[in-house]
Image (cartoon, rainbow, N blue to C red):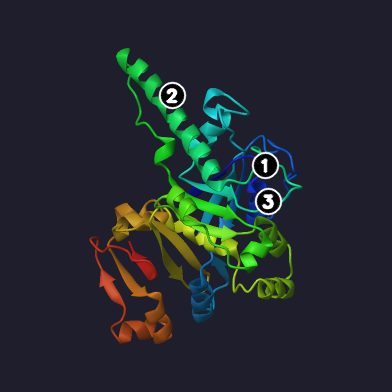
Amino acid sequence: MLSIGIVGLPNVGKSTLFKALTKKQIDISNYPFTTIDPNVGVVEVPDKRLKVLAELSNSKKIVPTAVEFIDIAGLIKGAAEGEGLGNKFLANIREVDAIAHVVRVFEDKNITHVHSKIDPVHDIEIIKTELELADLQSIEKRETKKNKNEELPQLDLLASKKVIYVLNASEEQVKNRWQPEPELIKAMGDSQYVVLSANFELLLSEASSEEKDLYLTEVSQESSGLDELISKSYELLDLITFLTTGEDETRAWTAPRNTPIPKASRAIHTDFEKLFIRAEVINWQKLVEAGSWGRARENGTLKLVGRDYIVQDGDVVEIKI
């Protein structure tokens, strides 16, 4: 499962965001280092295709793919040298696949900023610097061991991890369609970003369906900012979703882009790659248009593929072993 570590300075809204994501009751009080051990939550990846396919197949249940979010406590300047809770959190970051970097862009005199001012560019540079310093320490330790002729595993550098920036705005900023200025965009580099209000997303996560629609209308949004964050986080490592559907269940599966179908089928069962003979494959929209698996086979839209087929996003598959 893809794991995303939520990082950032203290008091930028990380734990509020995590609570909205997972609906877990965790401490989000206004105090640096509230989060001592990383909290972990598994979040469903929004996928409207599943409901459509489940209705077509009269499936008993729907199983979406998922992302694991890990709430990592706030880094501060000097973390690489042991300041604050130091290297403990840098180790937590090392274990995740990618980083969701929460950056505070809202003003609120009642919520203390660790540097007493709102400066998102400066905040981003602090986190980048701490990750780079931690990497430098790792490289130096590696060289020492190398000189002692010790066998060494591949070095996993923190600064090389893919990042999505979560620009935590006020509800008013979201309503007014706030967007980052050029200087902030430059600081984020080539990384994707999402603008949302963690407090507003928490309100949405705790609301009824009718209340949620009303709240979204008030800020002129059609969907939750969290849905965009979850989807972009899933896409961050260039993953695709393929699908299976039947009376028992309609399920989403994850595979890296450009993966041959036998290898992708390991997500369904670890033995499938070895036992794979062929597969029937159809794009989910073409299956819906055909109305059933049988009619898709009759009209020629269902393809029979071999071991060299590269599975595509939105493929509905039936593996033959």
Measure the C-alpha gap from mark 2 to mark 3.
Answer: 32 Å
In x, y percent, where is residue 181?
50, 57
Q: Residue at x 43, y 67 (%)?
A: 243
Pointer 2 with pointer 3, Cβ within 8 A? no
Task: Give whichever of discs 3 and 1 has the lower sequence position.
Answer: 3
Query: Is 55 on the left or on the right of 297, as rendered?
Result: right
Measure the C-alpha gap from mark 3 to mark 1.
Answer: 15 Å
The residue tagged 2 is 137
Label 2: element kind: helix
Which kind of residue does numbered mark 3 sit on? Thr
Tell me if I can see residue 139 in this picture.
Answer: yes
Task: Give whichever of discs 2 and 1 has the lower sequence position.
Answer: 1
Marks 2 and 1: which is nearer the front? 1
In x, y percent, where is residue 292?
42, 83
Pointer 2 with pointer 1, Cβ within 8 A? no
Measure the C-alpha gap from mark 2 to mark 1.
Answer: 28 Å
Which kind of residue does numbered mark 1 sit on? His
Q: Residues within 10 Å of mark 2 (few under 14, many from 20)?
A: some
User: Which numbered circle lies on residue 113?
Assistant: 1
The residue tagged 3 is 16
Q: Residues within 10 Å of mark 1 (few under 14, many from 20)?
A: some
